[in-house]
Image (cartoon, rainbow, N blue to C red):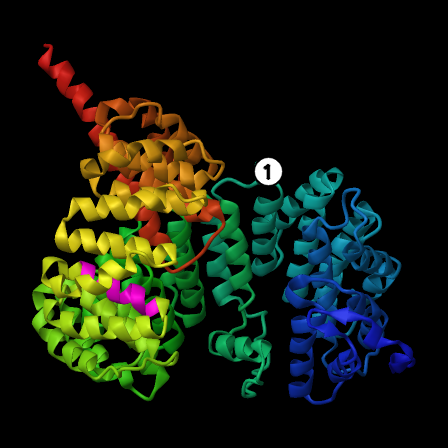
Amino acid sequence: MFAGLFDTDWASLTHAYGAAEGVPQILLGLASEDPDTREIALDDFHGAVHHQGDIYDSTVACLPFLFELVANPTSPGRGAVAELFASFGESLDGSGRLHGGDDAAWRTPYRDAEGFIRSRTDEFVLWLTDADAQVRAAAAAALAYFAVEALDAVLLIEQRLAEEPVVECRIALITAAADIAVRAPDTADRVADWLLGIVGDDTDPGTRLAALVHLARSAPDRAVDDLTGRAIGLLSEISVHHGYTAAPADDRPATPTLVGAVRVMFAPEREGRADAWTSDLVRVLHDALAERVADRIALVADQLQHPDPGPRVDALRMGSQLIGRWRGPFEGLVRLIGGQLDAPEHPVRYMAALALQDSYDLAAPAADALASQVLALGPAAWCDTDRKVQDPYRMMLLALARLGDSRAVPGIAAALADGGEASMLVQTLGQFRDYRHKFEPGLLEQLAAVPAEIDRDGQNHVNKLLSAVRQLGTTEAVPDTIRILAAAREHENRWVIQSALHALKACGTAAQSAMPQVRQLAGHSDVHVALLAIETAWTITQNADDFLSDLRPRLDATDPGKAGLAANTAGTAGAIATPLTDSIQALTGADDLWTRVRAASALIRITGTAGNLLPILTDAWQENLHTRTGTAECVASLRAQAEGFLPLLRAELADPRRYTLRQGVWSNSNIPSDEKLLHTCAGAIEQISWPAQDRKESSR
């Protein structure tokens, strides 16, 4: 096998990390008898030759050998290699790099890959009847991308479904037909009719569920009545169906690869589970239901009642994504998630804790369940050597702390005393100032132990301590904070400098002794350091003359972006910054959107009037979702002057999607960021509407 492999001049080809001379060894690894070697090779292929879905000239050169490997029935691991072809199809389909008139050289491998694979589509047809079920499923997925004639592929899939004995392969065939219907609209009606027929026939419930959800995905206008109810019923049938077989357990330790880590991570969820494939079907169904949040809550709630752990893990994962991406009445769902914290199965406990950890205030209905587990495990669980104890405990403690629940205090104190990574817990300390006596002795002791020279490895710990000072407002920490600031300045450690300034700012007038250093930093070359120092000095001294004189040259900077940041700082002082308004007004015509927004917002905060500034904020509101929270706060202060903003505020509240989902971003702060936007918009509507209502009542 692989005749001619070394005849190719691999060194002249490239992949993600440069010359591709090592690719032959990757290909040989894919054909190895040893499963660990194959897994490492597959990871290397994804990491370099097909990095993040990209296609290089070396990827194209690999294609004949990949086809050869899959075609050889004695090759172990053929299925994983066959799955690469669908990945190539996804890259070609989603990149848009094959379209348009740009003939840039980097587009060439994409065109070459598509042409070569399409020339061998007949091999996918042969693989549909292969003895290896994984190869058959992969062939269906690849055919959906590369079939020369879409209708012929659909007819072939219909024929093959009637003969396919393995449910995973039947699902792959149905998925492929739906994919074709989406890409080739002239086949959509036929595929929809076919899927409707499957939904209504007497085949096994897994196949019917696949047809149901992919019908909803590919032809939403043809979906059956009571889609969610039908799906719940089929999931119930699947749980008692005896015709499915669990995949053999793969209990190999993880190889030093991402592929291996993922395999081991998900192994406990899938071990012994004959219906593991329902995970993907439920995900597709959730995507199809989209803004039908009530239906999705019902689906998750039903799965959470399942006696087996697998469906409950699926439900917890989907419930977490639902809460994180959509808006809705989640109180009951959160309570059900909390009910899984004491489940006997570790994967269930872990997923429940993970779901609540990043729910912030929305986790309140599960507070008692969280506290029960946190108190039962005790503070020592923070350092437990058993990760099955430590990991859920840390997530539950963080969830409870983010609620500001006093039952988290002993656990937080123990975690901070440990001196390890607890930065997310530190961010919650502002809610526990009434319990500062529990934290401050240990905090002050650790601050005193910070050495004069802070190396890069130690700065995370120092920043955590300074963040704790900031959150608690620990005025007794001012001397050590000043000492640390001096050391950071000496070594130009800007990260620690900013952390120290934030801490001093939080201590207010008690930080007077820090003013010599703070004043010097007001002239720092880094605009972020300088402006933070100016804000800190203003907070400590309320010296308007220094504040204005420090800001004025920053507002006149040649870089409008930096000037916009200075305008934002000016706005924090309100009317005190009135002498700076002319300079700030000039920034409202800047090309940069954020500079215009910061300048307009600052002028409103300083003058209390809208002037001609609302169009700037309106344009920014529609152009960049990240401006909305600050803008809503700003227009609220204008009251009736911002009446024209009400439709935008109300439209935001009416949108079922979290704004972070609309922006296409994901982080563990998605929920609090969006909840703050909702709260701010609601408050702005009340502030803007109230004067008008009051006037109407007064005129009666």
Question: Looking at the picture, does residue 661 appear above or below residue 350?
Answer: above
Magenta region, residue range: 495-505
Q: Is residue 266 left or right of residue 514?
A: right
In this rendered view, identify the residue nearer to me: 699 or 280: 699
Residue 87, visible in the rendered structure: yes
Q: Around disc 1, counting alpha carbons within 10 Å, would you say few (fewer than 14), some (14 to 19), or many (20 or more)?
A: some
Q: In this view, does 670 lie to the left or right of 423?
A: right
In this rendered view, identify the residue nearer to me: 249 or 621: 621
Q: Which amino acid does label 1 sit on?
A: Arg
Tell me if residue 216 is in the magenta stretch: no
Give x and y (percent) for residue 292: 43, 42
Residue 333, visible in the rendered structure: no
In the structure shown, which secondary structural element does the residue marked by tag 1 occupy? helix
From this viewpoint, which residue is outermost toward the top?
A: 700
Q: Is residue 137 left or right of residue 421?
A: right
Question: Looking at the picture, does residue 378 appear above or below residue 476?
Answer: below
Number of numbered tags placed on the structure image: 1
Residue for point 53% across, 79% down: 261
In this rendered view, identify the residue nearer to me: 523 or 392: 523
Name the dominant secondary structure of the magenta segment.
helix
Q: Quadrant of the C terminus?
A: top left
Task: Write down the quadrant of residue 586 in the picture.
Answer: top left
Give x and y (percent) for residue 12: 84, 73
Give x and y (percent) for residue 560: 44, 42
Task: Write down the quadrant of residue 99 in the picture.
Answer: top right
Tell me if residue 497 is in the magenta stretch: yes
Residue for point 12% across, 61% down: 512
Q: Quadrant of the N terminus?
A: bottom right
Label 1 sits on residue: 222
Question: Looking at the picture, does residue 413 appear above or below residue 534?
Answer: below
